[in-house]
Image (cartoon, grey):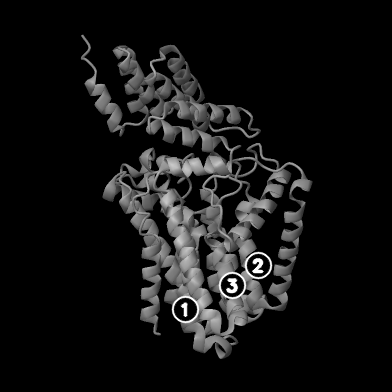
Amino acid sequence: MNILIAVELIVFAALLTYSNSLTAPLIFDDYAAIVDNRAIHAPGNFAQWLLPPEALPVGGRPMLNFSFLLNYAISGTQVWSYHVFNLGVHLLAGLALFGLARRTLLLPGLGERFGASSLGLALAMALLWLVHPLQTEAVTYISERAESLMGLFSLLTLYCFIRYVERRSALFAALSFICCLLGIATKEVAVTAPILVLCYDRSFVAGTFRAAWKQHRGLHLALFGTWLPLMLLLHHLSARGAGLGLGVSPWNYALTECWGIIHYLKLAVWPHPLIIDYGEAMFGRAAEVFPQAAILALLLAGAVTAFWRWPRAGFLCLSFFVILAPTSSLVPVAHEPIAEHRMYLPLACLVPLAVLGLLACGGKAYPWMVGALVLLWGLVAWERNETYLTALGLWGETVAERPANPRAHVNFGIALLAADRLPEAQAQLQEGVRLNSRLALPQGPYRAGLPHDRLGVLLGREGKTEPALAEFQQALQWDPANPGFHYDLGKFLAKIGRAPEARSQYREALRLRPDFPEAQAELAKLPAVR
């Protein structure tokens, strides 16, 4: 086998696994990141896409916002170009991992043992990582490209570092720095990239931290220097639901993350069930997660010990925890304490350990074991992508798995409403309102107002005028600056013959969002003022 064939196999596996994902509709945060993101609707405004609104999922992430700007310029809100981009990013990340693994296995100290099989081993690692079902959320869920794009830049940062070490090339040093900077501008977790490079240098190249710093001080300083612009991008982190001061107890968050990290490890081995939204609920008592906390403490202690005694294997073990640290310990994510997409890059630390374990234990059966895993995980990932094709299927599954999650009920209710299944939709939306009212965490105005707005639409369809108006008003009390809520109220007022009030609501929607073609069209339909 040569490198070209290996690359072709990686491309084929990625395209085949995600061939059914290109028509998956916008869901959840996609609407805020794309439809409601005015910063990408005016491509000539450099300042807007460079500094997108802080409250949106793209806030503080100019590179991520720029990628959406490109897609919006190509296809507007049609999803195909967004999915092609996401798949392209995932494929490039798989190729970067392949190159990174192959060149690592050829380094002095490893080349003597793995040099002859480096190509096959690197291919196995890339394929298993590429088709693993855990990756579907970061690839098929459009707005979670933040994770995959950040992962790509982090892998390229490390890959370019290796090339710099091999050639002593200023070009690859510059490319490593640029990729790190782009990762920082994509998602905050890229803060770990300079740490990973330094640990890699110590484990595989220089042998000690002192030697690593002495030999490659300039590049390490440049990489850690990317933390300076990150400080500016983190200025309004709380607006995005992350950081301290959002009503999250550090103790409860730590307990929840103990459960979450062990759950991630379980999904890495047995990826079922996969859930798009785990909700905001957190554990409150140590006894609830004592087994997970004990296992996690042992694993972390083992990773640190391995890093010092067996640096090469220990690098992979410790890197897993380093990458998860920002969101699992340092910066609480109040409204999403558990999320499968966070395993996108950490999985690249686990898969090589699994491949080398299979090689050591499998003997002659090793190629068949790897092939069977690639096929099995690819089929599970393909099946998972099928779930994303309908909002009904996705949110119905989420409600079944997480019945105490109010967001799941609200989104399932919205999907049922779109399917004209009104009694079921009303039950789900009302359950979402009930569960929302029991949350200890403060809700964002949009999320608190959304179920009321959708209930207003539903009751309006049933001809219940006064209850519908009450729900619309409740939604606007929560979020008076939401153009969608004004638009929905305007449509209902127009329907019941209150044209002047409808006109006022449409105009307010357009004031809040000038590029709102639906509001413009509905306003034009109203009878002229006499």
Q: Which mark is residue 417?
A: none
Looking at the image, is mark 1 or mark 2 nearer the viewer?
2
Sequence-earlier tag: 1 or 2? 1
Spot occupied by residue 331 in the image (x, y as percentages of width and height): 62, 49
> From what the image shows, is residue 454 above or below residue 219?
above
Q: Which mark is residue 318?
A: 2
Residue nearest the observer in this picture, 14 or 403? 403
Picture residue at 60% right of the left edge, 66% below the top: 195
State the separation of the CA atoms marked 3 and 2.
15 Å
Residue nearest the observer in this picture, 186 or 313? 313
Q: Residue 354 carries which label?
A: 3
Picture residue at 62% right of the left edge, 59% below the top: 266
Question: Left or right: 330 with respect to 178?
Answer: right
Spot occupied by residue 270 in the image (x, y as percentages of width and height): 58, 60
The residue carrying mark 1 is 163
Estimate how packed mark 3 is, as few (under 14), some (14 to 19) or many (20 or more) residues with alpha carbons within 10 Å.
some
Quadrant for the N terminus, please: bottom left
Element type where label 1 sits in the image:
helix
The answer to whether residue 383 is visible is yes
Quadrant for the C terminus, please: top left
Element type where label 3 sits in the image:
helix
Looking at the image, is mark 3 or mark 2 nearer the viewer?
3
State the separation of the CA atoms marked 3 and 1.
25 Å
> From what the image shows, is residue 321 above or below residue 220?
above
